[in-house]
Image (cartoon, grey):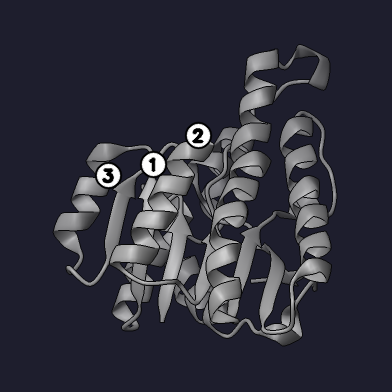
């Protein structure tokens, strides 16, 4: 299977890259970190396609997706994984630029990928788009209001998209669960180590993503 995956430089995205590769699937991945992208190009085979992309630039996203589809092929599975969180703070103390960046990366970038990949999926008539939400996209906690807002937004955006797509193409909001990532550590400190590592999570998550289908369209799913 050909899989388009954002945010592959670290954490869940990087772990999924390696697990999909181990299972025999091909990944077209992107991230802003050019050094991390070069490492993936070196460590993984030529059947994969890795690019340095700023997801906050719609023109960069458009160029990346056009290049992927023309040179590598149209993906069968799209996973919008890239995401960031604000530093813990009451909402009124969150700087405007930090709030805007959370929204831009977690919602607007997802829209940009969808905006440019859906025409390719429509042309083929099939595909699955999995947008990573969060437990905080279905509940809330203090001091992460911008992140909660963005992930609730992902839930609503994805469920609305699911009603717009024709039969054969599915959109699914996915809560990945609690994983020991840099993001979790920023919220919970040392206690984050109680959660599974991204590599441990990916062993379960990769098969989960691969089995998503039209029956999951618009349904809230959790790894």
- Residue 109 visible from this viewpoint: yes
Residue 153 percent coordinates (x, y): 79, 46
Report helix, strand or loop for mark 2.
loop
Local SS, label 1: loop
Q: Does the rendering let one see residue 87?
A: no
* Whole-percent x, y for residue 171 in the image: 70, 69
Name the residue that disc number 3 marks: 36
List x then y, in percent, for residue 123: 55, 75
Q: Residue at x 79, y 32 (%)?
A: 145
Q: How far apart, in angstroms, are the residues tagged by discs 2 and 3?
A: 19 Å
Quadrant in which the C terminus appears: bottom right
**Which residue is painted at 68% across and 43% down in the image?**
107
Q: Is residue 18 above or below residue 186?
A: below
From mark 2 to mark 1, how far is it between C-alphas?
8 Å
Please give left or right for residue 164 compared with residue 29 in the image.
right
Q: Is residue 36 above or below residue 213?
A: above
The answer to the question of whether label 2 and label 1 lie on touching residues, with beta carbons closer than 8 A, is: yes
| Viewer-closest of 38 and 201 | 38
**What's the mark number on residue 57?**
2
Left or right position of 60 against 51: right
Q: Which mark is residue 69?
A: none
Q: Nearer the viewer, mark 3 or mark 1?
A: 1
Q: Is residue 52 left or right of residue 79?
A: left
Front-lying residue, 199 or 151: 151
Which residue bears the numbered disc 1?
Answer: 53
Callout 2: 10 Å neighbours few (<14), some, many (20+)? Answer: some
């Amino acid at each position: 299977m050909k899989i388009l995956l954002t945010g592959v430089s670290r954490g869940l995205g990087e772990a999924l890259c390696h697990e999909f590769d181990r299972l025999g699937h091909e990944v077209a991945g992107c991230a802003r970190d050019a050094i991390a992208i070069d490492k993936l190009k070196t460590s993984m085979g030529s059947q994969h396609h890795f690019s340095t992309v700023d997801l906050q630039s719609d023109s960069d996203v458009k160029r990346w997706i056009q290049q992927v589809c023309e040179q590598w092929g149209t993906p069968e599975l799209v996973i919008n994984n890239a995401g960031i969180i604000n530093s813990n703070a009451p909402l009124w103390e969150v700087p405007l630029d930090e709030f805007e960046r959370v929204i831009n990366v977690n919602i607007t970038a997802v829209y940009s990928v969808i905006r440019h990949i859906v025409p390719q999926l429509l042309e083929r008539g099939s595909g699955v788009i999995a947008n990573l939400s969060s437990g905080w996209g279905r509940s809330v906690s203090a001091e992460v209001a911008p992140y909660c807002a963005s992930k609730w937004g992902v839930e609503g955006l994805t469920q609305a998209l699911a009603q717009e797509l024709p039969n054969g193409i599915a959109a699914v909001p996915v809560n990945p669960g609690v994983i020991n990532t840099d993001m979790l550590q920023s919220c919970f400190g040392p206690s984050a180590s109680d959660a599974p590592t991204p590599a441990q999570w990916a062993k379960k998550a990769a098969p989960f993503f691969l089995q998503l289908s039209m029956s999951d369209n618009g349904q809230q799913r959790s790894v």
